[in-house]
Image: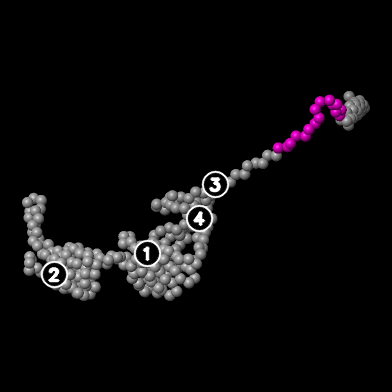
Amino acid sequence: MSAKSNDTLFLAIGGLAVVGAGIWAIVQQSHIEEFRAAPSVPSGGIAYEPGAITVSSPESRRWAPAPHQTAGPLWIYDVFTPPKIYYNTQTRQFTPIPPDGPPPPPKHEPEEVPFGLELVKVEQPLFRLQLVGYVGEGDQARGNFLNVETGAVVFGTTGRKLPDLDIEIVRFAAERRVVQQPGGTTLVFVEATAIVRDLKTGEEVKLDTQTRVPGGAPVVTLKDASGAEHKARAGETLTLGDFTYKVGELTLEPPSATVTKEGAGLPEPETKTLVVPPPPAPPPPTGVMVQEGFPGAFPGAFPGF
């Protein structure tokens, strides 16, 4: 085919392409005109009502707080964040600080006004005469009696009076006793007893060498802020400075004392039941070496955790 024939063919193809593009543009323009026309609204039926738009809010999720280990509430291992661990070389104990820091200090409570008295002890006094021994047996026996108030030992038998104590020995005896024991064994011993009369009250009291006989009301020993000690019985009053303390009920076991405080500056009487305070805590050991814990440690790294 000659070059002239090729040129004619290319011109024919180009002409057809131009004619096709024109036809396509005319067809598309007719479709665009359709969209420009206003849509027809139906005259009947229910009127249009806009509906509410529901806006969804995605749920927010966070990691749950890390629980503490069985070793204690301060042993908390957060994600990639272990606690700081300190070791006391003297007590051989670990002390942790959680990832969020040490626990807050306790709230400061208002300082309590001191009561002014502290319980030392509550005692049951002894009867002022005690039988502590004897000499002889039968009618010739004499008792060894202890004067509790002075500590002196006096001898006495039936009918003797002790004017300085207002006591009369009504009867004294040191008699041999025979007691049969299991297995046929016989136990022989001397039992010394005395019946004495309190000349103040007329009461008779039995004494023996085996026990100490109490007498009178319990006595409480109280210590004030200066360290001085004061003794009192139930119902008695102590005056210390601007305040008075009235002793109420006393208990021997466990030892306790109910005391009422009155005086200037108190809007109303203050009553407390005092008990013996615990001994002071020992001072902390000196020379303690503390070293910081091990980053990235885990509970199994230490025995017992």
Mark 4 or mark 1: which comes first in sequence? 4
Label 3: which residue?
64
The residues bearing labels 4 and 1 have C-alpha atoms spaced at a distance of: 50 Å
Mark 3 or mark 4: which comes first in sequence? 3
Label 1: which residue?
248
Marks 4 and 2: which is nearer the front? 2
Mark 4 or mark 2: which comes first in sequence? 4
Residue 50 against residue 82 in the figure, above or below: above
SS of the residue at dot 1?
strand
Q: In this view, does 219 lie to the left or right of 37?
A: left
The residues bearing labels 3 and 4 have C-alpha atoms spaced at a distance of: 16 Å
Residue 132 sits in quarter? bottom left
Q: Say which of 284 and 160 sits in front.
A: 160
Which residue shows up at 21% across the image and 69% down it?
Answer: 199
Q: In this view, does 60 lie to the left or right of 75?
A: right
The magenta span reads: 39-54
Q: What residue type is labelled 1?
A: Gly
Label 4: which residue?
98
Q: Which amino acid does label 4 sit on?
A: Pro
Mark identifier at residue 159: 2
The residues bearing labels 3 and 1 have C-alpha atoms spaced at a distance of: 57 Å
SS of the residue at dot 2?
loop
**Residue 275: image location, x then y, percent:** 37, 63
SS of the residue at dot 3?
loop
Q: What residue type is labelled 3?
A: Ala
Contact, mark 4 vs mark 2 (Cβ under 8 Å):
no
Contact, mark 4 vs mark 1 (Cβ under 8 Å):
no
Marks 4 and 1: which is nearer the front? 1
Marks 2 and 3: which is nearer the front? 2
**Residue 228: image location, x then y, percent:** 36, 74
Marks 3 and 1: which is nearer the front? 1
**Residue 207: image location, x then y, percent:** 18, 64
